[in-house]
Amino acid sequence: MNYQELYKQIVAKKSFLCVGLDPDMAKLPQHLLSCEYPIFEFNKAIIDATAPYAVAFKPNCAFYEAEGLDGWKQFMMTVEYIKKNYPDILVIADAKRGDIGNTAKKYAQCFFKSMDCDAVTLAPYMGADSINPFLEYDGKWAVVLALTSNKSADDFEQLSSFDENDSDEDFDVEPLFMRVIRKVMTFGSKDNIMFVVGATRPEKLAEIRDVCPDNFLLVPGVGAQGGTVADVAKYGLNDHCGLLVNSSRGIIYASSGEDFAEAAAAAAKQLAGEMSVVL
């Protein structure tokens, strides 16, 4: 899915909602646990219920890997189901891979060719070698961690940094996450690179927009982590929206009963409504 196709979906649905598919076996409704593939049955119901409001789904690999072979199988079943039934919705594999060389190439092959995901989240710590293999696939996206919403993000992301290549005249000290964004932007373009920026730091979005005015930003942290659509939109919107705001727990666990899908639909509809207003 390319930039214009994604924007077209946002305009059509008046929403920039990304629904995180983080199925924790300990939190699934009891009536699904007797199914052969409980995670997939849960996901399928959530997907069908929220598809009218979502422009992206983001299955978090950890929740599938934790269940071994059956978990991975249900991850693939989930992606296949979205692709077959909702081909216009972006599928982001939340894998946070960050290796190099042939390993990075195999990760790219895994998620983009074998599984046919549209995007994958990446950790940029090891530099261009961790990102470039994912940019070799047309219509696919590298979603690079920049400024995340967790408390310990400040351990590294906010450290002051400088470029030794700066001249004395333009010498500047800035947070490491900003250096990461500037550098990663030289690897690709707005058509294949997004950045992860947490909703719990909305004021930083304005600074980030100064550096990458056109790239899409994947913004987790709305809902359960305390971020709001209004704050994110205030600082992060651009002429093509430029935002994918993710909500996971606030939608998929809106109810733990047999009405979980209906509750998820209501939660997604509410967030999409807030997005429609700011659009």
Image (cartoon, rainbow, N blue to C red):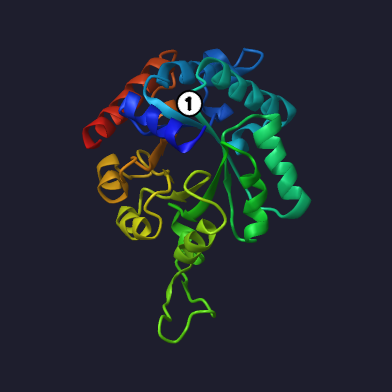
**Residue depicted at 60% across the width and 60% down the height:** 125
**Residue depicted at 47% across the width and 20% down the height:** 46
The spot of residue 38 in percent (x, y) is 60, 18
Quadrant position of residue 240: top left
Q: Nearer the viewer, residue 154 or 208?
A: 208
Q: Is residue 253 visible?
A: no
**Residue depicted at 40% across the width and 55% down the height:** 212
134 in relation to 56, above or below: below
The residue carrying pointer 1 sits among few (fewer than 14), some (14 to 19) or many (20 or more) residues within 10 Å by Cα, namely many
Identify the image quadrant of the C terminus. Answer: top left
Q: Is residue 170 visible?
A: yes
The spot of residue 105 in percent (x, y) is 73, 46
196 in relation to 90, above or below: below
Check disc 1 and report its element: helix, strand or loop.
Answer: loop
Q: Nearer the viewer, residue 141 or 268?
A: 141
Q: Amino acid at mark 1?
A: Ile
Instruction: Say whether residue 241 is left or right of residue 187.
Output: left
The spot of residue 17 in percent (x, y) is 38, 32
Q: Residue furthest right?
A: 102
Q: Which residue is mark 1?
A: 89
